[in-house]
Image (cartoon, rainbow, N blue to C red):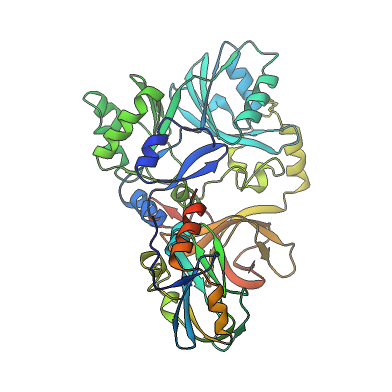
Amino acid sequence: MGKQTPLYDKHVVMGAKMVDFGGWDMPLRYGSQIEEHHQVRTDAGMFDVSHMSVVDFTGPDTREFLRKVFANNVDRLTTPGKALYTCMLKEDGYVLDDLIVYYMDENWFRVVFNASTHDKDLAWVQEQAKPFTMEIIEPPNMAMIAVQGPNARVKASAVFDEPMRTEIAELAPFTAAYFGDLFISRTGYTGEDGFEIILPAAQVNDVWRALYGEGVQPIGLAARDTLRLEAGMNLYGSDMDESTSPLESGLGWTVAWEPEGRDFIGRAALEKIRSAGVNKKLVGLILEEKGVLRDHQKVIVNGLDDGEVTSGGFSPTLGKSIAFARVSKEVGGSCKVEIRGKQVLATVVKLPFVRNGKPV
Amino acid sequence: MSNVPAELKYTKSHEWVSVDGDVATIGITDHAQDLLGDMVFIELPDVGTNFSKGDDCAVVESVKAASDVYSPLSGEVVEVNEDLADSPESVNSDSYAAWLFKIKMSNTSELDEMMDAATYSGVAADDSH
């Protein structure tokens, strides 16, 4: 038995199939995962993401510390509540984790790490923080709900009374703020509009129930994966990890090279990788024949090194199988993917596959 | 609890069989479709192929995973359910109506080694825990 979130009993009562995810018992799906996927693309759905790690960095050296440990530059954050997506790298330029960091005030930044990387992330930042005057705090008894979909903002804000209702509905993209005990950000992992709400565990069941009352349906991890895949969003551990750099993972845009003087961890190695020439890239694949693309299938283009599917699956929006694949940088047009010994045709496309509910 | 019709025979790898003379109709059980989730692709054998009992003979792919289907019986494939190419999801809505293929049995005594509904219900229940 794994760790349980404060919503565990709700999931069981709602008929969820529970699975282990990074040591947590999480809902895979409540009924049909394809219906759950469409629910988020066309209306509004909610995810229990309480397994993710909320960590607060506080103290006078916080900004300086985060300038060092993150590949993106927290100096881009100057307005309270503003969020930034970044990778955290090792000295060798490979990826320890990807995360969102929020600027709260000059002595306080909040970070949301992945669930499966919690222990190594915490050990890493604690080690790196030793020379700095700052504290790393995990606020206890927290829960987190993501509300996503074209109607997510209207339905989620309807749970609250005025003036909070209007303030929440008007939250700017990639920005967060406290509303009472609730830390609400306009972010997500589906390619749809919506919120992620970090709140005390003691309140999460009431908020979940209220959202359900507004017609927000529960969505499991299975649909979360097909949604993020369509939206072209990387999954740590599949699309990048400690053996790949951001430059071959479609994450070059998250590396802040300027200013040159910022010596973030992994910079020297990453500069070497860049000047030697990055010969792999992450692309999208659309399968043009019957079948389903799966993680680790071989991608074949004549005359070039073989590539590999990093995240494969099925797109309910396109009605076809789609994938991310790491391939030689020259690959374009089409390729073959080996599925159970047979080579099948796939089209190579730019990510994402779907934006705001529509095929791109 | 999943649906286990009394008149069918079952394997522990979650196939069902119904018999008409020397022809057996084969599909996957309600419990199997529930484990796999939404079906998106079903690969069926060619008519005329000969299988021995236990051979992998078809693949059912859900959004979640690909799963082999094993022939519960020896014999020759005489018909496949072509409708599944366009509507694999019919296996989710009624896995006993959405049969996969039919085999002309070469050894009907193999039927005696299969499970009845009561025995299979026990297997499926244990499997769910």
Count of labels in the image:
0
Viewer-proximal residue among B16 and B122: B122
Q: Is residue A234 left or right of residue A30?
A: right
Residue at x-position 56% and y-position 81%: B109
Q: Quadrant of the N terminus of chain B?
A: bottom left
Residue at x-position 56% and y-position 24%: A75
Viewer-proximal residue among B12 and A93: B12
Residue at x-position 48% and y-position 76%: B26
Image position of A245 with respect to B40: above or below: above
Image position of B103 with respect to A56: above or below: below
The reply to whether residue A92 is in sight is yes
Viewer-proximal residue among B22 and A325: B22
The reply to whether residue A170 is in sight is no
Image position of A197 with respect to A228: above or below: above
- The image shows residue A164 at horizontal and vertical percentages of 26, 24
- The image shows residue A156 at horizontal and vertical percentages of 29, 35
- The image shows residue A291 at horizontal and vertical percentages of 54, 69
Q: Is residue A326 left or right of residue B110?
A: right
The quadrant holding residue A304 is: bottom right
Residue ranking furthest to the left: A162
- The image shows residue B63 at horizontal and vertical percentages of 48, 59
